[in-house]
Amino acid sequence: MPGTLTALTMRPGANGEQTFARSAPTYIDARDLAANTNETHTVPAGADFVYFSADGDFYAKTNGAAAVPGDVTDGTASEMNPKHWDLNGVTSIGLIASAARKITLSFYKGKNS
């Protein structure tokens, strides 16, 4: 059903090996970013993990506004091109890029959620 969260699972292959293929998502949001403009995305209720995909470089930050970094040496920079995050304690994700970008966010719940 669209809008519901899929449990993130990884199943064994035919010979019992770990496949590292994630289950297909059923909850996907998309953001159309304007250049150099932060957009804050609210994490959906019950989401434990997010997978990002974009058509170019972008930056993300948990629970705050993302920024295209210059020199940042105090640990507060936004992360460039994250692939996936555990969302424990995360209620929002700031997104920004130096050029217009399209980003999808695929959300999952934990297997026991």
Image (spheres, rainbow, N blue to C red):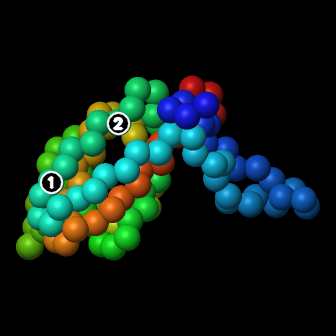
Give how far across and how far down residue 100 sits, in percent: 22, 68
Give how far across and how far down residue 3 sits, in percent: 50, 32
Cα distance between the residues tagged 1 and 2: 16 Å
89 or 83, which is in the foreground?
83
Horizontal relation, residue 71 to residue 86: left or right: left
Judged from the image, the secondary structure of the residue bearing numbered disc 2 is loop
Q: Residue 89 lies in what quarter of the image? A: top left
- The answer to whether residue 97 shows anywhere in this view is yes
- The answer to whether residue 110 shows anywhere in this view is no
Q: Residue at x 67, y 59 (%)?
A: 20
Report the quarter where the C terminus lies: top right
Question: Disc 2 marks which residue?
Answer: 43
110 or 25, which is in the foreground?
25
Give how far across and how far down residue 24 sits, in percent: 63, 49
Q: Residue at x 46, y 27 (%)?
A: 46
For badge 2, the amino acid type reads: Val
Horizontal relation, residue 22 to residue 70: left or right: right
Question: Disc 1 marks which residue?
Answer: 38
Judged from the image, the secondary structure of the residue bearing numbered disc 1 is loop
For badge 1, the amino acid type reads: Asn
Q: Earlier in the sequence, mark 1 or mark 2?
A: 1
Q: Residue at x 30, y 72 (%)?
A: 57
99 or 59, which is in the foreground?
99
Report the quarter where the N terminus lies: top right
Q: Residue at x 21, y 44 (%)?
A: 40
